[in-house]
């Protein structure tokens, strides 16, 4: 891999693409550190240190949320818009046909609608965060005009990040949205290492050593699961057209173990965070009921066993849910039948769809269990080490490893193409 990276920098066009992406990431980090006016930094730091759910949302904003920067929402509204659009494909056949049947042109239209939807979603999320943080004393109670200005700035910041993600996509060395999220995660790594070193004592040698070993095991496990796939063999019948013979070859359908990615974790965390927003809304009408909802949420969060169990269960359920809405065995079966393909030993048509559904269900069982364990990994590590200075962010590692592997593959493919062209 190192030799491929060296070759990539020797090729001018690939080197320019990497440098362009690096400059875009620098600009992203600048945006993430320009705060909106009137922020109490100490109150802000205390709020995020005591709230794990908002810490997770801060992860997807690349630390911009914790700084209350103009890009505080990060790509969260855009990710939410994409999720909503994918859910709507189950309700509206036109959207489903646009995404699955119209090729690249249909997906371009689909993504354009997602960007339009990002604006109102960003406005609602920005307004909700400002009101929530104002109730915690982190920001002052803005006037209507000041709130409108701040919400407009926040939405504009999110849309700029969407634009930056598309600029990265054009370089074809990785997914722009994922790279921005990974950059935000890695930006917090130096601070985490510093905090761990500051709290280190010689008596913690075994604990720290075990932590390093566990981290390496987690990274290796994520690589194995991310690259793991179930290959379903496909054969194509021989067909004669004129004087030419077509078909008679064998291939396979790959079903990845980690097909859902981190989407189920986002679903789960969105559901877990809802009671806090609900409590803030209720408190506007009734301070007493709002306090009760907030107290219930705080007690739930402090019960690590209950919180971890429900978190794991939600991730597990949402993994199956997401696979269910993005995987259509009937459509795959029809496409195979149209192209003359079949699974050996399985009749074409509906029996093939039933077989594919059973294969995906078994593969998803392992993937959902692994993803649930990754989600609650910080709680498990904290329980084993007894300290908050050492925490393995399973979701952070999952995103970082997956994006790094994807970037490595795309850079490798571009280097290979140029080597072939120059041969």
Image: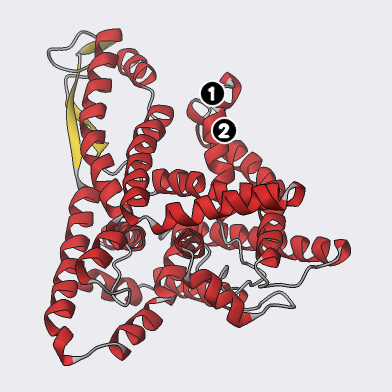
Give the quarter of the image for residue 243. top left
Element at label 1: helix
Secondary structure of the residue carrying numbered label 2: helix
> How many marks can you see?
2
Q: Residue at x 60, y 62 (%)?
A: 161
The answer to which of 87 and 98 lies nearer the viewer is 87
CB of mark 1 within 8 Å of CB of mark 2? yes
The quarter holding residue 66 reads: bottom right
Residue 168 is at least partly visible in this image: yes
Alpha carbon distance from label 1 to label 2: 8 Å
- Residue 164 pos. (x, y %): 58, 63
Q: Quadrant of the N terminus?
A: bottom left
In this rendering, position of residue 76 left or right of residue 201:
right
In the rendered view, tell whether residue 329 sits above or below residue 99. above
Disc 1 versus disc 2: nearer the observer: 1
Q: Residue at x 19, y 73 (%)?
A: 211
Q: Which residue is mark 2?
A: 106
Q: Which mark is residue 97?
A: 1
Mark 2 crowd level (few <14, some 14–19, many ≥20, 10 Å Cα) = some
Q: Residue 348, image x and y in percent?
A: 25, 9
Whole-percent x, y for residue 12 in the image? 41, 74
Q: Earlier in the sequence, mark 1 or mark 2?
A: 1
384 lies left or right of 127: left
Locate residue 224 relative to residue 77 in the image: left or right: left
Work out whether 137 lies above or below 218.
below
Q: Nearer the viewer, residue 155 or 11?
A: 155
Q: Nearer the viewer, residue 149 or 257?
A: 149
Q: Looking at the image, which residue is at 75% across and 61% down?
A: 151
On the image, the x and y values in percent for residue 181 come to: 46, 62
Asked whether the viewer can see residue 175, the reply is no
Q: Which mark is residue 323?
A: none
């Amino acid at each position: 891999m190192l030799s491929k990276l060296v070759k990539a920098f020797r090729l001018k066009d690939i080197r320019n693409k990497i440098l362009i992406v690096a400059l875009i990431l620098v600009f992203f980090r600048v945006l993430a550190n320009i705060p909106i006016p009137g922020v109490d930094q100490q109150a802000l730091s205390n709020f995020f240190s005591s709230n794990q759910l908002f810490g997770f949302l801060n992860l997807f904003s690349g630390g911009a949320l914790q700084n209350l920067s103009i890009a505080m929402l990060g790509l969260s509204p855009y990710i939410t818009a994409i999720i909503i659009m994918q859910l709507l494909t189950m309700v509206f056949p036109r959207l489903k046909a646009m995404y699955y049947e119209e090729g690249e042109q249909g997906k371009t239209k689909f993504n354009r609608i997602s960007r339009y939807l990002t604006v109102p979603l960003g406005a609602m999320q920005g307004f909700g965060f400002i009101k929530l943080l104002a109730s915690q004393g982190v920001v002052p109670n803005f006037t209507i005009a000041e709130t409108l200005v701040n919400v407009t700035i926040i939405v504009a910041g999110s849309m700029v990040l969407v634009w930056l993600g598309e600029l990265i996509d054009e370089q074809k060395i990785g997914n722009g949205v994922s790279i921005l999220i990974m950059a935000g995660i890695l930006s917090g790594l130096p601070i985490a290492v510093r905090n761990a070193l500051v709290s280190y004592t010689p008596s913690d040698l075994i604990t720290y050593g075990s932590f390093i070993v566990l981290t390496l095991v987690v990274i290796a496990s994520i690589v194995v699961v991310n690259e793991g796939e179930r290959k379903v063999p496909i054969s194509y019948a021989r067909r004669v057209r004129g004087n030419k013979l077509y078909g008679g070859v064998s291939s396979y359908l790959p079903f990845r173990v980690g097909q859902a990615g981190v989407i189920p974790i986002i679903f789960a965390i969105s559901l877990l965070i809802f009671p806090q927003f609900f409590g803030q809304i209720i408190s506007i009408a009734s301070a007493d009921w709002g306090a009760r909802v907030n107290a219930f949420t705080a007690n739930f969060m402090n019960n690590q066993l209950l919180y971890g169990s429900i978190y794991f269960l939600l991730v597990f359920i949402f993994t199956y849910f997401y696979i269910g809405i993005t995987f259509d065995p009937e459509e795959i079966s029809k496409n195979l039948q149209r192209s003359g393909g079949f699974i050996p030993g399985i009749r074409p048509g509906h029996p093939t769809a039933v077989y594919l559904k059973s294969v995906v269900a078994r593969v998803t069982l392992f993937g959902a269990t692994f993803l649930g364990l990754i989600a609650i990994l910080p709680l498990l590590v904290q329980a084993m080490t007894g300290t908050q200075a050492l925490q393995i962010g399973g979701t952070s590692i999952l995103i970082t490893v997956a994006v790094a592997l994807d970037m490595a593959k795309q850079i490798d493919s571009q280097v290979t193409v140029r080597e072939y062209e120059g041969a």
